[in-house]
Structure formats: C-alpha cells, structure tokens
Amino acid sequence: MRSILIAGALLAAPAAFGQKTISIDSAAAYAGQHVQFCAPPASSRYFVQMDGKPTLLFFGKPYPNHVLSVVIWEKDRKNFSQPVELLFGAGMGPVCVNGTVKMVEGRPQIEVTSPKGIGIKEEEEEQE
C-alpha cells in the first residue's frame, strides 16, 4: 500500500520548502522551525468560551495530556469547507500538518490558517 495526501501543495512537497518531517514526540526540539508531521489526532475541541474561539487538535494523547497541539482560530475557520473538528477530529485517521512549532504552556503547538497547512493522509491500494 502507498500513502497519498489529500491537502494543499505545501503538504505534497515538504522538501521543496525546506521543511523537516518529524515525529510528534520530537516536536519540542524544533521550536521556531517550520516542520511537517503526520499522526492521528487523539482528540479535538472547539473552545467557544475562550478569546479567539480556537479549535484545537490534540496529538499523542487526548487533552489535557497531549504531546502536541494544532490550533485553528475562529477567524480562520471560514477557510475550511466544514467545521475543523469534524474534518480532522479523532477517528478520522492520520492528519498531516505543516507549520512553525511554537511552545505554548510548555508544549509544542502549530498554528494552521488554511487547508494548505493540514490534510488527511489516506491509504490507497496499489493497482496490480
């Protein structure tokens, strides 16, 4: 089986943009760097009572014990065809994300503003 990405052009060619593909467990070591990772979300949450109304996808373990998070602010939700937590929430399979790692409350986080920064990694059977 081979993998294909359903996402924007940036996910298709990380090497062309100088990105490193990393594991979520090593993300903190790449703070300040532009990276790509692929992993299944452990949980997701739309924080409607918080300033900026962020949607967070949590990787490694469910919130609040997550290893890494991806944030999509309310102002950027309009850039997606459906609510982000439904598109990329837990149980949707591996998600590939690219962006700059920032440390937030001692944990790595990547901000995504459009579908170019996130996509579902789908498995496709090879033709024989």
Image: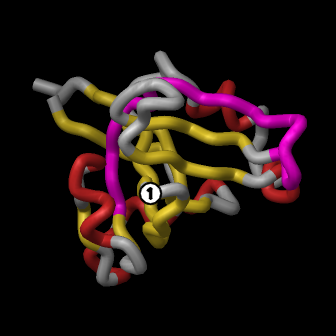
Answer above or below: position of 50 versus 79: above
Q: Quadrant of residue 27?
A: bottom left
Answer above or below: position of 122 versus 75: above
Where residue 40 sits: x, y (%)? Answer: 38, 31
Q: Which residue is mark 1?
A: 106
| Residue occupying the point 68% across, 25% down | 86
Local crowd size for mark 1, using a 10 Å CA cut-off: few (<14), some (14–19), many (≥20):
few
Answer above or below: position of 35 versus 27: below
| Residue occupying the point 60% across, 29% down | 44
Total marks in image = 1
Q: Which one is in front, 86 or 51? A: 51
Where residue 82 sits: x, y (%)? Answer: 77, 34
Classify residue 95 as left or right of residue 30: right
Q: Quadrant of residue 95?
A: top left
Q: Is residue 67 magenta?
A: no
Specify the amino acid type for callout 1.
Gly
| Residue occupying the point 77% across, 54% down | 73
Secondary structure state at the residue bearing disc 1: loop
Q: Quadrant of residue 2?
A: top left
Q: Is residue 46 magenta?
A: yes
Please identify the residue farthest to the top as the structure is shown: 91
Q: Which one is in front, 63 or 36? A: 63
| Residue occupying the point 52% across, 25% down | 43
- Image quadrant occupied by the N terminus: top left
Q: Which one is in front, 111 or 29? A: 29
- Image quadrant occupied by the C terminus: top left
Where residue 4 sits: x, y (%)? Answer: 33, 43
The span shown in magenta is: 36-53
Classify residue 31 as left or right of residue 56: left
Q: How is the image coloured?
A: secondary structure
Where residue 125 sits: x, y (%)? Answer: 22, 24
Please identify the residue farthest to the front as the structure is shown: 105
